[in-house]
Image (cartoon, coloured by chain):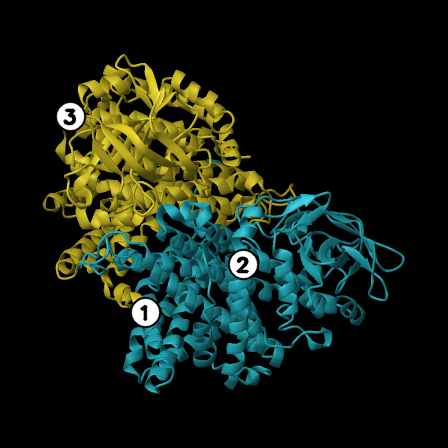
Chain colours: A yellow, B cyan
Amino acid sequence: MTSYNAPVKDMQFLLHEVLKISASDIPGYADLDEGFTAAVLDEAGKVASEVLAPLNAVGDREGCVLENGVVRTPKGFDAAFKAMKEGGWTALDCDPDYGGQGLPYLVNTAVGEIFVSANMAFNMYQGLTHGAYSAIHTHGTAEQKAKYLPKMVSCDWTGTMNLTEPHCGTDLGLMRTKAEPQADGSYLITGQKIFISAGEHDLAENIIHLVLAKAPGGGEGTRGVSLFIVPKVLVNEDGSLGARNAVSCGKLEEKMGIHGNATCVMNYDGARGWLLGELHKGMKAMFTMMNEARLGVGLQGYAVAEAAYQNALAYAKDRLQGRAVTGAENPNGPADPLIVHPDIRRNLMEQKSFVEGARALTFWGASLIDAAHRKGDAAADGLVGLLTPVIKGFQTDKGFEMAVQAQQIWGGHGYIEEQGMSQFARDARIAMIYEGANGVQALDLVGRKLAQDGGKHVMAFFEMVKAECKAHEAEPRMAEYTSPLKAASKQMQAAGMFFMQNGMKNPNAALAGSYDFMHLMGHVCLGLMWTRIARAALTALDEGRGDAAFLRTKLATARFYMTRQLPACMLHLARIESGAEPVMALEAEAF
Amino acid sequence: MTSYNAPVKDMQFLLHEVLKISASDIPGYADLDEGFTAAVLDEAGKVASEVLAPLNAVGDREGCVLENGVVRTPKGFDAAFKAMKEGGWTALDCDPDYGGQGLPYLVNTAVGEIFVSANMAFNMYQGLTHGAYSAIHTHGTAEQKAKYLPKMVSCDWTGTMNLTEPHCGTDLGLMRTKAEPQADGSYLITGQKIFISAGEHDLAENIIHLVLAKAPGGGEGTRGVSLFIVPKVLVNEDGSLGARNAVSCGKLEEKMGIHGNATCVMNYDGARGWLLGELHKGMKAMFTMMNEARLGVGLQGYAVAEAAYQNALAYAKDRLQGRAVTGAENPNGPADPLIVHPDIRRNLMEQKSFVEGARALTFWGASLIDAAHRKGDAAADGLVGLLTPVIKGFQTDKGFEMAVQAQQIWGGHGYIEEQGMSQFARDARIAMIYEGANGVQALDLVGRKLAQDGGKHVMAFFEMVKAECKAHEAEPRMAEYTSPLKAASKQMQAAGMFFMQNGMKNPNAALAGSYDFMHLMGHVCLGLMWTRIARAALTALDEGRGDAAFLRTKLATARFYMTRQLPACMLHLARIESGAEPVMALEAEAF
């Protein structure tokens, strides 16, 4: 059996020593002092360890069951969901006008990590609701907001996003679901949507579906797509529940993981819906939520890896097998613990340095979203747009890889379902796929984000890295972090240059290297994070603040990342610079 | 639903154009002409596509069931097993003295790939039997061989290997299973073994367990371990079956994958066993089968990836999504097939170049085993010993990675169990763990094999690579393959040098880089294979032999591997040369 403890100490260090949030001028950040965030994170950690983590294996084993159109969630999910609602955890960063607590998105992100680590599948019911909340909050009329948001903030009603159809996922222009306008201003929605997470379940009295569909007159492709609010149960003028709408769950998918979450085929048979946002601008409305949703999936990548790491570490310290090559370290026992072996240590350090670096990147990304939303910082908005495909794509690839490495430490026991390590790998796998498969993230990054606004966001990123390195020039102890970062950043610039010089003549020359570029940039981002962490640790050590032993682990982990992981940038650059020819040489027919 | 077609054309090219087997002086190879191997492979392919592949999903879904001590295999397995026996597929390379067909191990390897691709879990029943057959064949008395082998060659009786116990897997010195000598020369075996593949099932009338146990007087650790033959049903003098032995299956494990194979907890409660080989030399007896067993697992790595690749490719050609960035390629359809997108092409080329390269390496390894066994070639024996941890560790890591990439091409559908792509990833995962976890392979490679016999096998490997490059100096068309190979080989030499110079002072300096070295060497091996393949393809093209379009795909795939995959060597070298410090800096307590 696996267990989970929230890494509150690490989060506190990140929030207050690295990001220094309470000194930030982002509205609302001044209130986030150490005592406040510690209280929130400790309490979230308690819920996670005591309520959510014990249900993780239950959800995996039992899964959801569809009977007569009703979906039963696993045993214990209902009570846990009530506990989440009662604790106010669903409302943290929501608008106080609708019952939210108005806290920054960053706080929600830190708490979200804790809940996802403890039980990813369970947390999706709330996570999807939050996404739908944001969409209505941003694009809804005053009436729509008043009608739906208070119940969604409290999670008395949950939400969904309906994009995918059997024949189209990435290419939504092929969509067939139709919306027919009615005389009263509503629409009748007809079509089938698949892969709808939390599409039907027994945790809430209503489910507010957001559905992309084609209304007449919008033209071909994605231009004709609009977004609709389609409640499972119609809501009366007075807010009470009315008749059941013509929407139903046709099937539950059996999946590789996240069994605790109901992945539904949803049938819309002339279901009544109301336009959300502008007619024929449904894609645009969806995309405004994209950064947040993708950041949330990038978070899942490392949050599941964190849980897997904790259990790999515990096993490595506990399991006795073999002797240290440098002499017995547990001479009175029958063997030494696994952790004495260098290759086990390598594996653990790869996990640790990834998870902590990704946490820093994600928290930073969340703070940029706060800066964009709370003080209208356009540069922050542009930067987080650039970082989003990296956070989503790189972190979920690596998160899965690290969950697999954690499983490996358990040897044969890692392959046995009862032990729980397989679940982490199976759950983490979906994050590479949904919310835009990682190949699509790479395409978004190289095909769109790099050149956006004349390339100014990537230029700003390079300037930021340069400034970070320059700021520590006078500090010789920082050279071991800044020198590799500088080299990696130059490799990233060279890759960008290659795209500029070759992508014009042949766009495939850029796209063939897009996946490598996403990973290259991911490493540069984590290198930047580890440089900032190292600087913060050195400062705290110099000033005699905090736990010195803990701070020194940050320096050692930063050093590991710089020497063992950052060199991956040169490999990605070499691949990128080989261009399109090796990739595209074979005709499709020749495969 | 997935499907599978044996890559007979590719195998034939490898056997006859690259390895040129029928011109080899290895006894038995002269008979392996093109017509013969084509007939064998075609027939195996038919069994695989028609009988085994359709049962792959069935086995995954149904799994095995334990009731009242009896294990039921999935529906259809029994009939398929009968078909395998009747077709003579279990006896291909077995000794004719015991009913085998006496074919080279290489033929068994090629056929084995086909069966594993079609149904890995099913094929393990036969694979384990072959391992036990080899152990008895090598170490058994004339009487033991006569008693057990004929029935094992025909798979009327199957076999198992019993090493692992709940508290020890890698470190078998901790073993607790006891063997008490009896007056009649037999032993009573008492203890519990876990993770016993095919430990109990309904496919055969008897199961011959090979069990490691400690007999009195052998001393501490692995020195006290002996190997015993413990039949499930005792065998009378006349070969008929007698009483049931005191061995039983206590539990079936629920696993991440290979559900069709019964993974058993086996309880030995004073079961009667007979010593196999020398007393207290059980580990040695096990190790003599190691190369073959580990080569077999390395084969599983790429064989499952081959099946996954075939289905990823079919989906990429079929699924319409988006448009080629260089202009519509399917202008009359609603969208272009996935395969037009450069990142999909990159993904497919990575799979293709790995699988074909690994097949070449595995076939070559099998031919070295034949050279060692059939003509006593000591150099071949030493070389295959060096290659074995690479074939096992590198190929199973990459095989899993590629199965995951194949799944990725299916997008959300890849995560749905019904579609079958998840099973490839889940099945492939075990190959990284069993038969020595891959970290142990890396330890075997760097801690043992590199320095074995004064390092002469690795020196011979370097010489072989050098000779390969030199042989093509006069051929300018080969430079694009030999130049990167030369560079990669130099990086491997530099890594070996680093180990020599630093490993003496601090063994951790070598072991911290062992995993990277295993991958570095894996890439050099595949680079060598692709060089040989390219040379063979050019020769055949020049001489007007074979299918020119097919031969040109080999050149394009070789080029892809050289430009996009081989550069990984420089990354592995950089990691290795960073030494032990970054890996070992944190004390165990500081994690």
For the point 25% across and 38% down, the residue is A178
Task: State left or right for residue A209 relative to residue B54.
Answer: left
Q: Amino acid at mark 1?
A: Ala
The answer to whether the residues at label 1 and label 2 have Cβ atoms under 8 Å apart is no
Dot in front, 3 or 1: 1
Q: Between marks 3 and 2, how big is the CA–CA gap?
A: 58 Å
Q: Is residue B311 above or below residue B584?
A: below
The CA distance from mark 1 to mark 2 is: 27 Å
Q: Amino acid at mark 2?
A: Asn
Q: How many marks?
A: 3
Tell me the tag on residue B379. none
Residue B281 location (% of width, % of height) = 72, 62
User: What is the secondary structure assignment of the residue under circle 1?
Assistant: helix
Residue in the picture at 62% in, 70% down: B87
What numbered label is drawn on residue B119? 2
Q: Name which residue type carries label 3.
A: Lys
Position of B324 relative to B93 (above/below) = above
Q: Position of residue B271 (x, y in %)?
A: 80, 51
Q: Which residue is mark 1?
A: A590
Secondary element type, mark 3: helix
CB under 8 Å between callouts 3 and 1?
no
Give the spatial CA distance, label 3 vs label 1. Answer: 54 Å
Q: Report whether mark 3 lies on the same chain as mark 1.
A: yes
Q: Position of residue B285 (x, y in %)?
A: 69, 64
Identify the mark at residue A375; answer none if there is no mark.
Answer: 3
Q: Are marks 3 and 2 in contact (CB under 8 Å)?
A: no
Give the percent coordinates (x, y) of residue A544. 33, 27
Name the chain letter of the residue that bears numbered label 1: A
Task: Answer whether residue B461 is visible to the viewer in this image.
Answer: yes
Question: Residue lying furthest top in this view?
Answer: A238
Q: Is B183 in front, or is A142? A: A142
